Image (cartoon, rainbow, N blue to C red):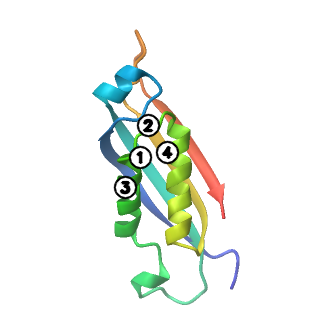
Amino acid sequence: MNSENSITVELSRLRFFAFHGLYEEEKKTGNEFEINVKVSFKTTEKVISKIHDTVNYVRLHAIVIEMMQHPEKLLETVAMKIAERIHEEFLYASHAEIQIVKLHPPMISFTGHVAVTYKKEF
């Protein structure tokens, strides 16, 4: 296998309402999140024509949905758990990048969002 050939499958701007957060109010009221996921894998020169030869984005989306349903105190924890599940599902994945954006952080006079990005080489 030529190590320079790779494919990246991306899911961008996935929106979720979930209850991740450190503070009690966040655990009760929840927040809106945006998730971006990239999963790369090495490939050969052969043209991919079967779903089992690639990262199935439907399964990838299901992993993100599953992990977003389990509240965690830290976004870092969520991102790392998503990466773990991706690697369990797609053993041939060589790299995952997960970005989780909290769209309305509970901060007084704050205009913007906060984000955590986790990059993992497998």
Amino acid type, residue under disc 3 in the picture? Glu
Q: Nearer the viewer, mark 1 or mark 3?
A: 3
Q: Which mark is residue 66?
A: 3
Q: Dot 3, crowdedness within 10 Å: few (<14), some or many (≥20)?
A: few
Q: Quadrant of the N terminus?
A: bottom right
- What's the residue type where badge 1 is placed? Ile
Please report whichever mark, 2 or 4, sits nearer to the chain's N-terminal start. 4
Amino acid at dot 2: Val
Q: Is residue 91 above or below residue 71?
A: below
Q: Position of residue 37 (x, y in %)?
A: 47, 54
Name the element at disc 3: helix
Q: Which residue is mark 2?
A: 101
Q: Are marks 4 and 3 in contact (CB under 8 Å)?
A: no
Q: CA distance from mark 1 to mark 4?
A: 11 Å
Dot 4: element: helix
Q: Earlier in the sequence, mark 1 or mark 4?
A: 1
* Image spot of residue 32 (x, y percent): 32, 34
Q: Secondary structure at mark 1?
A: strand
Q: Earlier in the sequence, mark 2 or mark 3?
A: 3
Q: Nearer the viewer, residue 82 or 120?
A: 82
Check residue 35 in the rendering and tell me which mark sits there, or answer none. 1
Q: Residue at x 48, y 83 (%)?
A: 53
Q: Nearer the viewer, mark 1 or mark 4?
A: 4
The residue type indicated by label 4 comes to: Val
Pick the residue in front: 18 or 102: 18
Residue designated by label 4: 78
Q: Residues within 10 Å of mark 1 (few under 14, many from 20)?
A: many
Whether residue 79 is visible here, answered yes or no, is: yes
